[in-house]
Amino acid sequence: MSDEFSFLVDSREDAIFRAEVRGWIEANVPRTLLNRAFRIEPAELRPWHRKLYERGWIAPHWPKSAGGMGATLDQQVILYEEMVRVGAPTPYPHGLNFIGPTIIELGTEAQKAKHLPGILTGDVTWCQGYSEPNAGSDLASLKTRAELVGDEFVINGQKIWTTNGHFADWMFALVRTDPTAPKKQQGLSMLLIDLKTPGITIRPIKTIVGDAEFAEEFFDNVRVPKENLLGKLNDGWTVANHVLGNERFATGTPRMAAELIEQTKRMAAATGAMDDAVFRDRLAALVIDHMAVSAYYRHGAQLHGAGKASPAASSVMKIQCGELAQRAAALLADAAGDYGAVYGDVATPDGPVHPTAPTFEARRMSVGSGTTEIQRVILARRALGLPN
Amino acid sequence: MELLLTEEQTLLRGAAAKLFARVAGPAKLRGLRASNSGFDRAAWDEIVAAGFLEAASLGATELCLVLVEAGSALCTLPVCAAAACAIPNGTLVLPALDKVVPFAAEADGFLTATGVVARDTLTVTPLRLVDGSAAGEIRERLDPPADRVRDLVLLGQGAELVGVMDRAFAIALDYLKTRVQFDKKIGSFQALQHRAVDEFMEVEISRSLVFQVAAAFDRGQGNAAMAAAVKARASAAALRVCKTALQFHGAMGYTDEHDIGLYLKRAMALAAQFGNEAASRRRFAALAGIERG
């Protein structure tokens, strides 16, 4: 996607920074990782993570005192945009964006010393233990029990839909520590769990894409030291909300849709779909909608930079980016015509394009980290003030 | 989301809101529907005297700030079209961008590729519009003015449409919070909440698009494709938001007595003038290189 509709306005320093980032990424990103149709497993991503770490750019949003870059939001956005511009993968967010910043803010000195270095280097992979078989959108009804016995929590229960659960070394998990609390949001705690602890069984789950993105974990009398509690006992809901709020916005650009629009154009030129006026109109509508969401994103980023961030923005971006990417994926499959069911790369004069993988890759965007329906409930209550 | 404005811009917006609340509004519009021309000369003179037709000389952002207020107050006067022509000294000159031009019968002349053509040298057939305003069909073929005039008109109409849909949505949201059925506020029903959120997003995204494009023009980075995109997107959004707002009001929304219908009608007029959603999207596609292979 060209930058002409992305409403970029870099200050002089930011323009210099962007040029530096662009040059460095082009020189350093492993070619084999570029423009991959499917997600990449953590082990294959690790050398790239390491390079970013060594350059000092792995944690732009972390404060310098914690080993981060202490970058402005604009610089964070630039780093992210320049990576996706060339189709480079961005590091997984669970350590860097979710639990890392939460440990920095709420963790003990011992927790910071133990966990932050591994997140930065990429040597330690994290996963998020939230969902359970009967606690999805209604997360607060989760049942995995952690009982404080002496100096240890004893954990029994099950987590599911854990992205990278079978690749991860550590999990941050929301567990029930006080089953007698009057409200279900009370009585929860956030625990940091070493997944090598005896009593944990992990089973990968094959996804609709065909790979194993996520896993389920069974906890059978798993003993975790008391000092692995993050934040206060029975205050896990607050900690979890903290995690959810962490730097969502910076990574919320509608870039996946932008990439799919480019692929759709390539595919449509190759198959002749571009000669169809109806197809061109649908493509134009999609490009315009992408431009509009980009404008919203840029507006939100400017407010963020001015210390006036809108609380609605991250939910709106999540809904819009997911729906935009899904529409783009559908149009790409349409553009492929009779190649539209091919499960593999289709050659075009402008490079290979996979006509079906994006349909599945884009599905996760409206389900993971709170479905678009839950985001709408959040907006109805918090942004519009509609009654319960 | 709020706009990041300078102090001068905030003052300008406040002044525009005050003026349009006085010279326009639902009650005034109802009066105009019954008048012969649909044109409020006294209101027009006040708007000209206040200097709002020169807002574009301050910047595209300033013009859009003024026009959001005009839209929100249901002002049907051709502020956007006249401001884009930037003809000083109070004469009403409108751009010859289409055969149908709002308030053509009231205009002194039309801006074309070769300058201003006086109205009395042309045949103009008067038309009444759905929102209570008027337009004229120009019989003669005129060459349209430079692209920058069209760009400013399309962008400005986008701003007016944002004003219209923003106000209509606010009225509908208020109704969701007060109307009781099944012993509950109807805004507590999830089916309506999700629809309300969808319309909220339309308003928010349209506003961001208008003002990001305006800012791009003010930096000298705006282009005709962006302006066409604004018109296409804002037209679709405003019609959708206003129709949902009507639906939220149930039978009340179908009455002439309730103001909510005035916003839908105003959105229809703005959307149709100088390139509707489909025409603007075709224009965008051609400008953005979405063309036959």
Image (tube, rainbow, N blue to C red):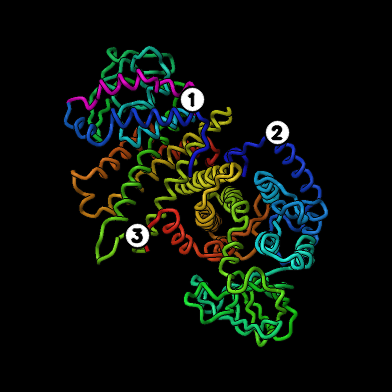
Across and down, in percent, residue B19 comes to 34, 27
Tag 1: amino acid: Arg
Write the residue at 77% across / 47% down.
Answer: A26
Across and down, in percent, residue B174 comes to 32, 51
Distance from Cα at disc 1 to Cα at disc 3: 41 Å
Local SS, label 2: helix
Q: Which residue is mark 3?
A: B192
Q: Which residue is mark 1?
A: B148
Give yes or no for contact between labels 1 and 3 (Cβ–Cβ under 8 Å).
no
Q: Chain of mark 2?
A: A
**Residue A323 numbered mark, or none:** none
Q: Which residue is mark 2?
A: A12
Across and down, in percent, residue A132 comes to 56, 77
Distance from Cα at disc 2 to Cα at disc 3: 46 Å
Q: Which residue is at the front of the view, A228 or B20?
A: A228
Q: Quadrant of the N terminus of chain A?
A: top right
Q: Quadrant of the C terminus of chain A?
A: bottom left
Write the residue at 42% across / 35% down.
Answer: B159
Q: Is residue B35 visible?
A: yes
Q: Residues within 10 Å of mark 1 (few under 14, many from 20)?
A: some
Tag 2: amino acid: Arg
